[in-house]
Amino acid sequence: MNKLLNKTLKAFAIYSLIVFSISIPFYYYTVDKIWLNELDEHNRIIADRTAQEMNNIHLSQDELDKTIFIWNKLQAGSRLEKMEFNTPAIDSTYTSTATNLYSETEDTDRFRGLAKSITINKIPYLLTIETNVEETEETVVVIAMVSLLFFFILVIGFLAINRWLSTKIWSPFNNTLTKLKSFKLSQETNIDFEKSSTIEFEELNEVLNKLIDQNISIYKTQKEFTENASHELQTPLAIIKNKLDLLVQKEPLTDRQYNIVEEVNVALSRISRINKNLLLLAKIENNQFEAREEVNISELVANALEFVKELRVDKNIVIHTAMEENVTVIGNRVLTEIMINNLLFNAFTHNTLNGELSIELKKGLLLISNSGVQALDEGDLYARFKKNSHNNKGNGLGLAIIYEICKKQKSSIEYTFADHLHHFKISFKI
């Protein structure tokens, strides 16, 4: 990717090069045309002067014939010849080429000629004058070199102007961009952009301030909602659960009534977990976990493993570990702990009877594998409320939470299925 100014500079440079390239043949034909016109005028002046001087010396016909003979011998590029009487007057120009017999290399030269009828002693003569045309190619080469020199001067000027524009005119834009990159919505404060004398940049800053104000307002509303929802939902759920516990303890219940109460308790517990997980997702998305520190992954995995080990008893799960000590990452400790707990909880609860669970931990990598029947659908693996059709446990938010935590902490999660094992690989940003 290139900067905007560099793109315009490239376009200007290409356009200038095209114009200069087209101008070289234009220069050639223009210079050649001007030079030929100058030679035509020169030849006509010579012809008029020759006719005038020949008439002014008042030679007899014999003397004139001898003079013309000597003229034709000595005057290179000119020739006088008698014309028949009643021959139409001639006044024409032409271009011809001839080999220079007096040159060692016998170069072919170009000549500009004039054929003009003149009258000497009342007798018509045809005067032909040919003048060597200077090599315009050499002139064009010089013009091309000069044009190329000015092209490079122009490009250097563009570069200098581009640098000046980048540091001066675009300074407010770069300042705005820098402040936007460091902006955090969780701070709930708008950006104080620098004033600009450029109308477009000032309008941009005004629009950005309005958008940021709107987003801060929405963020505050969502934050207040999540906080209020946590209290408003948890309180009635706790009351209902306590009432059910009292009902079981104080009132004699039939087996059917007891089973109904237990089903309600299970449903209430599930609702409570869903509420807590949704609130957690909202807090993650609203950047309410900003603290970053060095987190000991080895310690968190070991603690989480001890906590969930009791889950393996019912399924007789065999655990394999290969963990390096004191593996650390930079991140939020709370989020990292939640992610590891959810990964291990999923690996236990979604394991098979007599299955296996493998944990591999090394610098920058955590790999958790557990036995499974078939591969999961990777298309919506991290979608909310997506549950494995072969296992109805859980609320379908565990992987969604893990995915959001990885995204917030610049880590990556990868899922594969091989040899009847689900593999979840977390690559930490070191």
Image: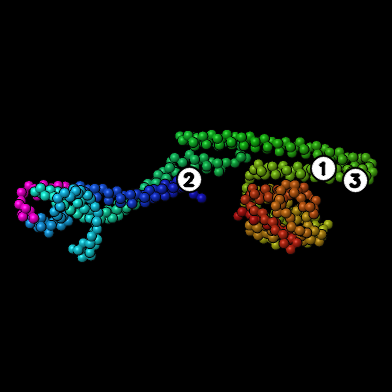
Tag 1: residue type?
Leu
| Residue assigned mark 1 | 268
| Residue assigned mark 3 | 259
| Residues tagged 1 and 3 counted as in contact (Cβ below 8 A) | no
Colour mapping used in the image = rainbow
- Mark 3: give few (<14), some (14-19) or many (20+) Cα within 10 Å: few
Q: Earlier in the sequence, mark 2 or mark 3?
A: 2
Tag 3: residue type?
Asn
240 to the left or right of 1: right
| Residue assigned mark 2 | 4
Tag 2: residue type?
Leu
Q: Is residue 363 above or below residue 177?
A: below
Q: Secondary structure at mark 3?
A: helix
Give the CA distance from mark 2 to mark 3. Answer: 70 Å
Task: Please tell me which residue is depicted at 37% across the width and 51% down the height of the picture.
Answer: 21
Within the magenta stretch, is there residue 285? no
Task: Where is residue 201? Give x, y as percent.
Answer: 49, 37
Task: Please tell me which residue is depicted at 24% across the width and 50% down the height of the picture.
Answer: 36
| Secondary structure predominantly adopted by residues drawn in magenta | helix
For residue 137, which quarter of the picture?
bottom left
Give the CA distance from mark 1 to mark 3. Answer: 14 Å
Q: Nearer the viewer, mark 2 or mark 1?
A: 2
Residue situated in front as seen by the camera: 8 or 243: 8
164 to the left or right of 79: right
Residue situated in front as seen by the camera: 400 or 159: 159
174 to the left or right of 78: right
Q: Secondary structure at mark 2?
A: helix
* Whether residue 224 is visible: yes
| Magenta segment boundaries in residue numbering | 42-65
Q: Earlier in the sequence, mark 2 or mark 1?
A: 2
Q: Is residue 192 above or below residue 141?
A: above
